[in-house]
Image (cartoon, rainbow, N blue to C red):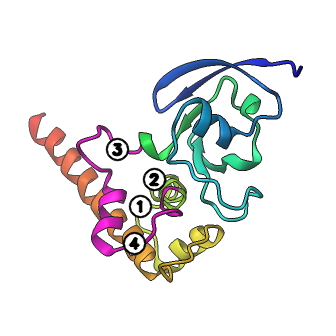
């Protein structure tokens, strides 16, 4: 019998404590132990990007990490992207509006790759977007609509930040 290791992890703002096998992949932990099936598994080698999550705010491939490595860390999956189930994140809305997805299998990985990128680069160029997405594979879209979605989301996030700043300034 395999020894289990107790891990404590925060996922999408919820705290979990589980005993897991040391060899359990983080992607499998999220999907099978926590039932967060938005994290997709494609290549299982970290090459396709479908399993991308945020690990302490950084985009990482969950299929090449063990669940035990997440002990004490904070994870965000695509299920935690929006503030509430009734409203999509601006990035999700942009994907919908620009037809940045077809089958949708790769979409969670693209979203989770783009989120920290857009936070660090609020005014990206098309070339910068293409560069950051070069590690994510989509077999359906041809990427142009995904790039369009990223640029639209960046614009909306900037406008939203300005609107929030103006509201705070006008109340002062």
Which residue does the image show at 55% across and 57% down from the upper left?
109
For residue 69, above or below residue 90: above
Cα separation, mark 4 vs mark 3, equals 18 Å
| Cα–Cα gap, marks 4 and 2 | 20 Å
Helix, strand or loop status at disc 4? loop
- Badge 4 or badge 2: first in the primary sequence: 4
Which circle, 2 or 3, is nearer the viewer?
3
Q: Which residue is mark 3?
A: 82
Sequence-first tag of 1 and 3: 3
Instruction: Please tell me whether mark 4 or mark 2 is closer to you in this view.
Output: 4
Image disc number at residue 122:
1
Q: In the structure shown, which secondary structural element does the residue marked by tag 2 occupy?
A: helix
Q: Of residues 154 and 92, which is closer to you in this image?
A: 92
Discs 4, 3 touching: Cβ within 8 Å: no
Give the residue at mark 2.
119
Residue 100 has which mark? Answer: 4
Q: Horizontal placement of 128 versus 93: left or right?
A: right
Q: Position of residue 67 (x, y in %)?
A: 72, 33
Residue drawn at x 34%, y 63% is 153
Quadrant in which residue 33 is drawn: top right
In the drawing, what numbered circle is on residue 163? none
- Packing grade of label 1 (10 A; few <14, some 14-19, many >=20) is some
- Name the residue rendered at 18%, 39% in the picture: 168
Task: Between residue 102 and residue 135, name the one nearer to us.
Answer: 102
Q: Kindly report the distance in space between the C-alpha atoms of the residues bearing marks 4 and 1.
A: 19 Å
Please check the rendered image and state whether residue 128 is part of the magenta-colored stretch, yes or no.
no
């Amino acid at each position: 019998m395999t020894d289990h290791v107790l891990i404590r992890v925060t996922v999408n703002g919820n705290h979990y404590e589980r005993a897991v096998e040391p060899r359990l992949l983080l992607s499998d932990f999220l999907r099978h132990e926590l039932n967060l099936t938005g994290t997709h598994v494609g290549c299982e080698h970290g090459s396709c990007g479908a399993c991308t999550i945020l690990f302490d705010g950084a985009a990482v491939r969950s299929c090449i990490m063990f669940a035990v490595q997440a002990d004490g860390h904070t994870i965000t999956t695509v299920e935690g992207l929006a503030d509430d189930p009734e409203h999509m994140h601006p990035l999700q809305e942009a994907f919908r509006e620009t037809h940045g997805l077809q089958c949708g299998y790769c979409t969670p990985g693209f979203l989770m790759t783009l989120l920290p990128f857009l936070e660090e680069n609020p005014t990206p160029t098309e070339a910068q977007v293409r560069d950051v997405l070069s590690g994510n594979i989509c077999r359906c879209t041809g990427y142009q609509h995904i790039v369009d979605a990223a640029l639209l989301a960046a614009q909306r996030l900037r406008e939203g930040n300005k609107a929030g700043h103006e509201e705070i300034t006008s109340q002062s």
